[in-house]
Amino acid sequence: MGIEIGGLLGLVILVLDVWAFVKIVQSSAGTGSKVLWIILVLLFPVLGFLFWLLLGPKG
């Protein structure tokens, strides 16, 4: 049962990270800022997503 829950959690994290990438690219932030956010989310999928969600560019 642990494998199914772990796999589902991994899938949820993947979906949230892809959503974050799309939102980062669509934002009106500068190119350097976008690149830094994408690198942060790639290197730290969970923490990077949470930091982006709280501190990232809006709009």
Image (cartoon, rainbow, N blue to C red):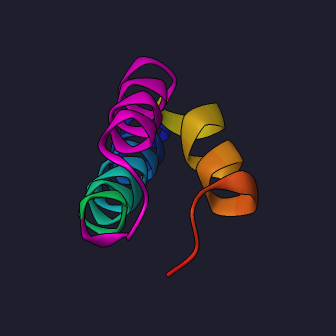
Left or right? Give the position of 30 relative to 22.
right
**Whether residue 29 is situated above or below residue 58 in the rendered picture:** above
Residue at point 45%, 43% (across, down): 1
Q: Position of residue 26 (x, y in %)?
A: 26, 71
**Whether residue 39 is situated above or below residue 35 in the rendered picture:** above
Q: Position of residue 21 (x, y in %)?
A: 29, 54
Which quadrant would residue 42 be assigned to in this image? top left
Residue in the foreground of this view, choosing between 28 and 38: 28
**Whether residue 52 is situated above or below residue 58 in the rendered picture:** above
Which quadrant would residue 38 be assigned to in this image? top left
Residue in the foreground of this view, choosing between 4 and 36: 36
Q: Position of residue 55 (x, y in %)?
A: 73, 54
Report the magenta residues as a range: 26-44
Residue at point 44%, 34% (across, down): 41
The extreme front residue here reads 30
- Dominant SS of magenta comes to helix
- Tell me, yes or no, whether the highlighted magenta stretch contains residue 43: yes
- Tell me, yes or no, whether the highlighted magenta stretch contains residue 4: no
Residue at point 43%, 17% (across, down): 43
Residue in the foreground of this view, choosing between 26 and 40: 26
Left or right? Give the position of 11 relative to 29.
left
The extreme right residue here reads 54
Q: Position of residue 48 (x, y in %)?
A: 57, 35
Left or right? Give the position of 8 relative to 51.
left
Residue at point 43%, 59% (across, down): 29
The extreme bottom residue here reads 59
Which quadrant would residue 35 be assigned to in this image? top left
